[in-house]
Image: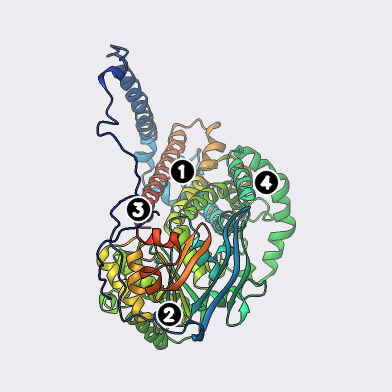
């Protein structure tokens, strides 16, 4: 886990003389600060993304680059569209009749919003972790093997090997290695969430979309998952929606601040948290609204 | 997380004495006990009716229980002249026709429930769901008549001859026995009509348990690149499977006790065992219905009442088992989901 240091409280000029909560300092050793953003390889490039629930527009012209092997945090107040944005990236919104997106989401050079996208393959390559742990009603082993069985032809030993590998990568192997045949929902909440991460990475994705993965679990389990996110970014590109700014500061390389369906500010996490250029961003991260 | 700069007076929220509403000063101390008494009496009435029914059945069937003993359940005979009564044929016919009904109705009900929950537009789902529930309220005699005029001829002219012409027609249990009467009036036909009658119950209950599958669990399946079919088969059905077992129990209990439609269609052969589902036979309920009005022999009446007692116990057992099972399922899925 990355250390979080806290600066002295500061005053904001234009407001009344209120005490502003301490600003979050970001860890020194993160990427994002000081590297050449434009030179990094693109994983997903979003251009002018609009999103509609029926007639109500929820996203307005979102343009953002998610870079390979980086953790990009998406923050913003409730209802700002951060989850909606995430759900566009693997087109899970297509399950619902009245939801649609327009614009471009480029993944490996092709627009995934186009009609001829292979959704099954897209969702294998862009895995998703949900707010609430969602183990399937089957054993721990079968949960992790689910995606593998679906997308690959593997013999028993290969399957077992890959399940073990995924569980180890998700830092849960030691806790479940003797309970592989027990039902997945018999695990604790935090374990269930790591099981879901194992299930997602077993299918060998390139990207992991995490929709507030720690909001339903306790602080100790949260710490474990944050640690895991930092480890996983060596291999995966991670987009992390979170309402917890400390979490964004702790684990992300880049941060996008969403407000009312628009991306107000995007930059390295260091910059966003230490010297935001937009007033709305500053007010949000210092806890003045949201 | 917002800082709101509104001054809230510390006492706000606590009503002052002057604002207190005056009470109506009611002194109805009798209302509650009266209502409680009425409610208890009504509840007790149900329990008493249930127990009373059981007791009357036992008392009236006592001559048969003591006079015939286990012969009632193990022999095939129905002869007032010799005083021999054995209902084995009716038991076999009941279970066979119920089995046929379940084999047809369960897969059909599951497919319809899946369609209603997962695939069709919510509006269509509501309309079709209502139609299916209406199907449940059609009197069984109507099913019986429709069965006689349409299904019996269809079985006799098309389905049964065709099945018997295939290699399947040689399999024991399908190959016709000595009582074979063309296959139109048969245990199988009764089972088919029974299937339509229990279909709404099984569909409605399985639809309700499938609706309990959390959306996020299904989304997680889609998120891993599953097709709708895979999510339904591997996740929804598995999640709902114990609830579906409960639904099947309910259907089974209903099919066991169904009388009129079966009496019309099953053929009323109660003096010999059926060799095949295409043979005519009888069921417990139709045996009672068709013999009771003509029964004069005391032992026969008592034997028929004993059959009623058997049916009473069987259907209660199935209902209780189904309800207990469903309650358990709701607790497990509701608590853990």
Q: Which mark is residue B147?
A: 4
Q: Secondary structure at mark 3?
A: loop
Residue drawn 31% across the image and 38% down it: B7
Residue underneath mark 1: B85
Identify which residue is drawn at 28% across, 17% down: B18
Mark 2 residue crowding within 10 angstroms, few (<14) / some (14–19) / many (20+): many
Using the image, determine if residue B315 lies above or below residue B26.
below
Q: Disc 2 marks which residue?
A: A70
Mark 1 crowd level (few <14, some 14–19, many ≥20, 10 Å Cα): many
| Camera-side mark, 2 or 1 | 2
As drawn, the label of residue A233 is: none
As drawn, B305 above or below A111:
above
Q: Characterize the local packing of mark 4: few (<14), some (14-19) or many (20 or more) Cα atoms within 10 angstroms.
A: many
Alpha carbons under labels 3 and 1: distance apart: 81 Å
Residue B1 got which mark? 3
Q: Earlier in the sequence, mark 3 or mark 1?
A: 3
Judging depth in this view, the residue of A30 and A158 nearest the camera is: A30
Q: Nearer the viewer, residue A48 or A163?
A: A48
């Amino acid at each position: 886990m990355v250390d979080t240091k806290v600066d002295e409280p500061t005053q904001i000029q234009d407001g009344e003389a209120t005490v502003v909560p301490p600003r979050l300092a970001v860890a020194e050793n993160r990427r994002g600060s000081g590297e050449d953003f434009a030179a990094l390889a693109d994983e997903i490039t979003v251009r002018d993304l609009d999103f509609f629930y029926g007639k109500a527009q929820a996203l307005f012209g979102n343009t953002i680059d998610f870079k390979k092997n980086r953790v990009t945090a998406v923050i913003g107040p409730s209802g700002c569209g951060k989850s909606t944005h995430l759900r566009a990236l693997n087109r899970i919104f297509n399950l619902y009749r009245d939801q649609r997106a327009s614009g471009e989401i480029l993944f490996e050079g092709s627009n995934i919003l186009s009609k001829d996208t292979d959704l099954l393959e897209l969702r294998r390559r862009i895995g998703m972790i949900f707010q609430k742990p969602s183990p399937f009603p089957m054993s721990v082993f079968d949960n992790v093997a689910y995606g593998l069985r679906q997308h690959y032809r593997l013999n028993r030993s290969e399957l077992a090997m890959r399940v073990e590998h995924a569980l180890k990568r998700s830092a849960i192997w030691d806790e479940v290695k003797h309970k592989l045949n027990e039902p997945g929902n018999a695990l604790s909440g935090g374990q269930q969430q790591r099981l879901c991460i194992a299930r997602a990475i077993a299918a060998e994705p390139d990207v992991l979309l995490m929709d507030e993965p720690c909001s339903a679990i306790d602080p100790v389990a949260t710490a474990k998952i944050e640690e895991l996110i930092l480890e996983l970014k060596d291999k995966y590109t991670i987009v992390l929606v979170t309402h917890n700014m400390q979490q964004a500061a702790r684990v992300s390389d880049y941060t996008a601040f969403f407000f009312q369906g628009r991306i107000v500010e995007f930059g390295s996490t260091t910059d966003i948290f230490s010297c935001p250029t937009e007033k709305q961003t500053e007010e949000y991260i210092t806890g003045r609204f949201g | 997380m917002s800082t709101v700069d509104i001054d809230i007076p510390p006492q706000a929220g606590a009503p002052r004495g002057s604002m207190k509403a005056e009470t109506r000063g009611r002194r109805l101390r009798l209302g509650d006990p009266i209502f409680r008494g009425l409610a208890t009496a009504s509840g007790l009435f149900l329990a008493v009716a249930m127990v009373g029914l059981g007791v009357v059945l036992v008392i009236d069937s006592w001559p048969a229980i003591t006079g015939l003993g286990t012969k009632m359940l193990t022999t095939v005979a129905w002869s007032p002249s010799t005083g021999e009564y054995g209902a084995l044929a009716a038991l076999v016919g009941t279970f066979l026709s119920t089995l046929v009904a379940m084999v047809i109705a369960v897969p059909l009900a599951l497919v319809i429930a899946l369609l209603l929950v997962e695939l069709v537009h919510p509006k269509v789902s509501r309309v079709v769901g209502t139609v299916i529930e209406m199907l449940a309220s059609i009197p069984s005699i109507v099913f019986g008549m429709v069965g006689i005029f349409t299904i019996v001829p269809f079985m006799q002219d098309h389905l049964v001859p065709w099945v018997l012409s295939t290699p399947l027609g040689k399999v024991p249990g399908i190959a016709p026995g000595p009582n074979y009467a063309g296959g139109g009036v048969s245990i199988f036909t009764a089972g088919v009509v029974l299937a339509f009658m229990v279909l709404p119950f099984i569909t409605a209950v399985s639809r309700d348990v499938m609706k309990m599958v959390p959306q996020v669990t299904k989304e997680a399946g889609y998120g891993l690149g599953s097709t709708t079919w895979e999510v339904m088969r591997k996740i929804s059905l598995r999640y709902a499977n114990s609830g579906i077992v409960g639904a099947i129990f309910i259907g089974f209990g209903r099919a066991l006790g169904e009388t009129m439609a079966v009496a019309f269609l099953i053929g009323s052969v109660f003096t010999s065992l059926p060799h095949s589902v295409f043979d005519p036979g009888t069921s417990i309920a139709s045996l009672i219905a068709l013999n009771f009005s003509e029964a004069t022999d005391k032992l026969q009446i008592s034997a028929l009442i004993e059959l009623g007692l058997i049916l009473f116990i069987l259907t209660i057992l199935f209902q209780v088992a189904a309800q207990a099972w469903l309650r358990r399922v709701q607790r497990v899925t509701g608590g853990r989901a």
